[in-house]
Image (cartoon, rainbow, N blue to C red):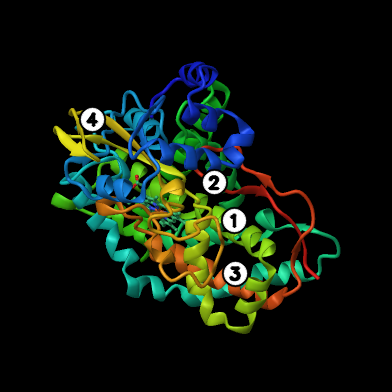
């Protein structure tokens, strides 16, 4: 989405609903009415972002099709990985062919990257992290127990848990987590289409700081490897070896994806449950329901609102012939409220039978590698929170993060008793 902010601004002024939704804070905060209008306009609607879809069937078809690719061009996309790439370029003077992270490449490169880290995210490997996640959540809740007045649940819990967990998993020092959170928050904006220049500069700084940290960390692991995932990636040799640039892109993706998204799921879930108090109480009585509650929270208010693909060859979608290169933006948050798949989609219902059919983790070859981990973290975190503070209530105005692709809260004041 290498759109200049000015282009989006002009389209918004001309009334383009997608550009307006991305530009105007109130529409961005409540995008669901815009999604409904787009859905009513048809399965593929032209907009400032090219064709967009709010349809679950079309989004799923595109994500699963090998006729579409990510259409990533490192020189034009000011996305997180685009920046990572260009910075890593400066690290990697040897001039190897461009090889960014798995999120932004198509098979066969994608397959290779994903295989290298996939072993760390199998269901069995993920389940083995449960005790660590539980311990981490409990320790954070212990710290909250003494609090008298309202606390910011994002700052004290929802943001802390994912960053601690992914740092543990990757074997990066958890004592740098305040830095990660600051850098990650700046960098998250680079996923947004039409980023204003001011945000772009802040994002760039955040990314550079992260790369600086990673460079030192990799040096350290080369001298003194552990048995963690990053040590293994650094130590790969022969055919499997990753270049410096690939290493940076891969670890940055894992680190960032590990904490910039799960924080949003936790905050969005707490807000939905606060508004549906009977469901919070029902889950406390019947904690086996938390797994499905997490699926419903992912569906109802999706932490990643959109992604896109580009046609690799001429392809027909929803009765329309698309030429190679045509970009389609998939509004995942809208697909997850498609009434053709989810009856009464605007109703939050933790017992919804097919909640898991949501596309919050995408679909196809790029289906979220950390989905199992995110589900486990959310289930453990929300259950532990409800058990420790059953009377928890929102106690002030929640503030949404000022982002377009990611959707979540920056500030979430709650009272604990
Ligand atoms: C990819 C969502 C948590 C690692 C993705 C994609 C989505 C997503 C939508 C695919 C984007 C696309 O198709 O263009 C989420 C959400 C999360 C979450 C909603 C939390 C609620 C995590 C966690 C990790 C992670 C905890 C752990 C490291 C990744 C990776 C990819 C990915 C590595 C790239 C996969 C590939 O390209 O093959 N995620 N994610 N995610 N996610 Fe997650």
Counting residues from the start of the chain, the first of labels 4 and 3 encountered is 4
Whether label 4 touches label 3, CB < 8 Å = no
Element carrying mark 1: helix
Q: Quadrant of residue 169?
A: bottom left
Whether label 3 touches label 2, CB < 8 Å = no
Residue 384 is tagged as none
Disc 4 crowd rating (10 Å Cα; few below 14, some 14-19, many 20+) is few
Cα distance, mark 1 to mark 4?
45 Å
Q: Can residue 405 be seen in this view?
A: no
Residue located beneath label 3 in the image: 382
Cα distance, mark 4 to mark 3?
47 Å
Q: Residue at x 35, y 42 (%)?
A: 249
* Label 3 lies in ligand 1 vicinity (Cβ under 8 Å): no
What is the x, y in percent for residue 369?
Answer: 34, 58
What is the x, y in percent for residue 103?
Answer: 32, 45
Cα distance, mark 2 to mark 4?
39 Å
Residue located beneath label 1 in the image: 268
Counting residues from the start of the chain, the first of labels 2 and 4 encountered is 4
For residue 141, side relative to residue 255 (left or right): right
Q: Quadrant of residue 51?
A: top left
Q: Quadrant of residue 244?
A: top left
Whether label 1 touches label 2, CB < 8 Å = yes
Cα distance, mark 1 to mark 3?
11 Å
Counting residues from the start of the chain, the first of labels 1 and 3 encountered is 1
């Amino acid at each position: 989405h290498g759109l200049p902010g000015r282009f989006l601004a002009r389209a918004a002024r001309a009334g383009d609903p997608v550009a307006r939704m991305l530009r105007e804070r109130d529409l961005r905060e409540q995008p669901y009415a815009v999604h409904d209008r787009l859905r009513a306009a048809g399965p593929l609607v032209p907009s400032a972002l090219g064709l967009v879809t709010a349809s679950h069937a079309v989004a799923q078809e595109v994500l699963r099709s090998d006729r579409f690719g990510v259409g990533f061009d490192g020189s034009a996309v000011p996305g997180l990985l685009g920046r990572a790439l260009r910075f890593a370029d400066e690290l990697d003077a040897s001039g190897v062919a461009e090889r960014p992270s798995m999120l932004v490449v198509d098979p066969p490169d994608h397959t290779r990257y994903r295989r290298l880290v996939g072993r760390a995210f199998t269901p069995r490997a993920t389940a083995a992290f449960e005790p660590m996640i539980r311990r981490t959540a409990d320790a954070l809740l212990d710290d909250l127990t003494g609090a008298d007045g309202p606390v910011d649940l994002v700052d004290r819990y929802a943001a802390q848990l994912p960053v601690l967990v992914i740092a543990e998993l990757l074997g990066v020092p958890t004592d740098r987590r305040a830095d990660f959170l600051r850098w990650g928050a700046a960098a998250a904006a680079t996923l947004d289409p039409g980023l204003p220049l001011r945000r772009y500069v802040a994002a760039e700084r955040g990314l550079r700081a992260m790369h600086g940290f990673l460079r030192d960390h990799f040096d350290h692991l080369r001298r003194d490897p552990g048995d963690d995932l990053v040590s293994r990636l650094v130590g790969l040799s022969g055919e499997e070896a990753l270049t410096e640039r690939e290493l940076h892109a891969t670890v940055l993706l894992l680190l960032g994806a590990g904490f910039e998204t799960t924080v949003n799921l936790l905050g969005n879930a707490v807000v939905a449950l606060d508004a549906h108090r009977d469901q919070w109480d029902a889950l406390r009585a019947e904690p086996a329901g938390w797994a499905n509650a997490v699926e419903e929270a992912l569906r109802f208010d999706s932490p990643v609102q959109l992604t896109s693909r580009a046609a690799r060859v001429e392809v027909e979608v929803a009765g329309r012939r698309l030429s190679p290169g045509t970009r389609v933006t998939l509004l995942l948050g809208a697909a997850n409220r498609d009434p053709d798949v989810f009856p009464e989609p605007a109703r939050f219902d933790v017992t919804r039978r097919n909640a898991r059919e949501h596309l919050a983790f995408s679909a196809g070859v790029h289906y979220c590698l950390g989905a199992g981990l995110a589900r486990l973290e959310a289930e453990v975190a929300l259950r532990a929170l409800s058990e420790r503070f059953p009377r928890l209530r929102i106690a002030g105005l929640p503030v949404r993060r000022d982002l377009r692709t990611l959707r979540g809260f920056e500030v979430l004041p709650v009272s604990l008793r």
